[in-house]
Amino acid sequence: MKKAVIFYKDTDNIGDDVQTYAAWQLLGGADYMLDRESLNNPGIDEKAKLLCNGWFMKNPDNWPPHKDLEPLFISMYVDHKHGCYEKMLSQELVPYYQKYAPIGSRDKNTLKLFKNLGIESYYSGCVTLTLPQYKGERTDEILLVDPFVKIFDKKYTETQINRLIPEKLKNRVSVITHHDFEMKHLSIEERMENVEKLLERYAKAKLIITSRIHCALPATAMGTPVYFMDVGYDRKQAHDRLEGLLDLFEVVDDTHFPMSSNQPLTKIQRKLGLYSKSAIKENPIDFDLKPETMKKFENNFKNASLLADGIRFKVKEFFDEN
């Protein structure tokens, strides 16, 4: 049977393409790339096995996938927005999920959602964890990849970045983003090429500081030291998608940054610039990467590798079946 993976045609988030790239690499290529938002009408005229992973979804009316698609549900995340809980987790879909169970959940909150439906499910982690370990030479580059992605205040983020980075290291720091409003206009081949180049940069970096899980997860899988900035995720539904995944990182929480909450009063305080006189009391990042810090990163890599092995086993078993 033909093999298919998922992509999101209209995304402006490079993290979506990182997940597609990882799935493609895991299968060693696929016959089809199918748009996540129209799996009910995939536009192919034959049966296919689908590696069904990722963030679901903007158009839950287009769920579940077409009957000609045989899905392996793994690394699944069901979002609370767009009516996804009501439509994707309805009692009417229980027989469908039972047919393809167990469901591999990317995070522990999604695991709870499926278990509450009575569906056999397990915590799989993310497909991006299956990217191979990088064993070559590293650069001296320190990458800040959307370190405050949940805080929509440019002046605030610039101030905190400036406080966070030691003066002697500022010439080695690059600040980049996973936002790309032009990527939807590129061909899928161009998009995968761009992801490959970006991942190579992540693999070779000395250190990555990010609040993007689809930077932190693949970087950890490739063996790059990662600090995850758990800042601005203070609303429960925003934090649910991180449940379980945070165990794979060294986490810097919002207690290190003044007025970093997304509660209404704090947003007003940020707008007024009241944070300007509040300094970071103690830098939470070990930029020297001391031996004891490196041991923590090595342990995170081992834990990520265990999840990756589980994903590889499930995927091989599924796609090797006739």
Image (cartoon, grey):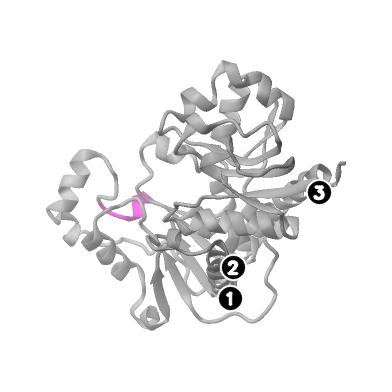
| Disc sitting over residue 224 in the figure | 2
| Amino acid on which disc 2 is placed | Thr
Q: What element carries label 1?
A: helix
Task: Find disc 1 in the rendering and name its residue.
Answer: 204
| Amino acid on which disc 1 is placed | Lys
Q: Nearer the viewer, mark 3 or mark 1?
A: 3
Categorize mark 3 by other alpha carbons within 10 Å: few (<14), some (14-19), many (20+): few
Q: What element carries label 3?
A: helix
Q: Residue at x 56, y 27 (%)?
A: 113
Label 2 and label 1: CA atoms lie apart by 7 Å
| Disc sitting over residue 316 in the figure | 3
Q: Position of residue 277 (x, y in %)?
A: 17, 61
Q: Where is residue 240 in the image (x, y as percent from the top left)?
A: 47, 37
Q: Residue furthest right?
A: 322
Label 3 and label 2: CA atoms lie apart by 26 Å
Give the magenta-colored segment's residue range: 253-258
Res. 130 image quadrant? bottom right
